[in-house]
Image (cartoon, rainbow, N blue to C red):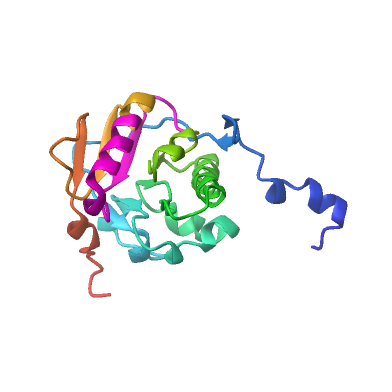
Amino acid sequence: MLLNSKEFRNSTKFLRNEYDCVGYYNMPKIKKQDINLSNIKLISYSDTYSNDNEINKSKGVHFFIDDKRFEGIYINPEKSLKKLSQYSFLISIDYSLFQEMPKALQVFNIFRSRWVAAYWQSKGLVVIPCVSWSDVLSYDFCFCGIEKESIVAVGMIGCKGNKQSFLRGYNKMLEVLNPKVIIVFGDPFDEMKGNIVRVNYIESRKVNRDGR
């Protein structure tokens, strides 16, 4: 059905304002949720199937992969909803934040991550917020929309080359969010504090597909 310009102007699909928002940038809020922390297993979004096996349905889905593999989710979140609803939980999308990016694009990438997470939660899915940052200037917006004392996830892929910058952001996250648990995807630095649960990157890509 085609919308006239007035309907389009006022549609939530255009305005993206249907969820509770917080902060100066009106970031959609990810509600605090719990998961079983005793044996966390993750699968990459790029390894998910429309009809997955029971082994993988017990896992959470992560997005610590190239942005091009999930760009379409923000535009058309309904398309992947049925597939993603098979899994135990989702880690919110890790849209890239690079210091070289214009700040406007960094803010938009955080907004997209929060909006998709809020959409998934509105559909009954369990979502754990992914936290990422670039430089000190990103601290004004990169933690917005995440409730304090939540379980959060942090990706270590690509962080080894700029250890001090990563640790500054990590420590700021601890200060601002005081997370209950930090799911660390990859090998954490020895200096990282907090209640850390490590997930092995290689294991997340070893997918049992019953021969598929």
The vertical placement of 188 against 144, above or below, is below
Instruction: Give 19 or 169, whichever is nearer the viewer.
Output: 169
The vertical placement of 18 against 108, above or below, is above
Instruction: Give 64 or 24, whichever is nearer the viewer.
Output: 24
Q: Residue at x 23, y 57 (%)?
A: 204
Q: Residue at x 47, y 32 (%)?
A: 31
Residue 205 falls in image quadrant: bottom left
Residue 131 falls in image quadrant: top left
Q: x, y (%) of residue 160? A: 21, 52
| Segment tinted magenta in the rendering | 145-172
Does the magenta run of residues contain 171?
Answer: yes
Q: x, y (%) of residue 159? A: 26, 51
Instruction: Give 123 or 92, whichever is nearer the viewer.
Output: 92
Q: x, y (%) of residue 105? A: 54, 52
Q: Residue furthest bottom?
A: 212
Q: In which quadrant of the rendered image does the C terminus lie?
A: bottom left
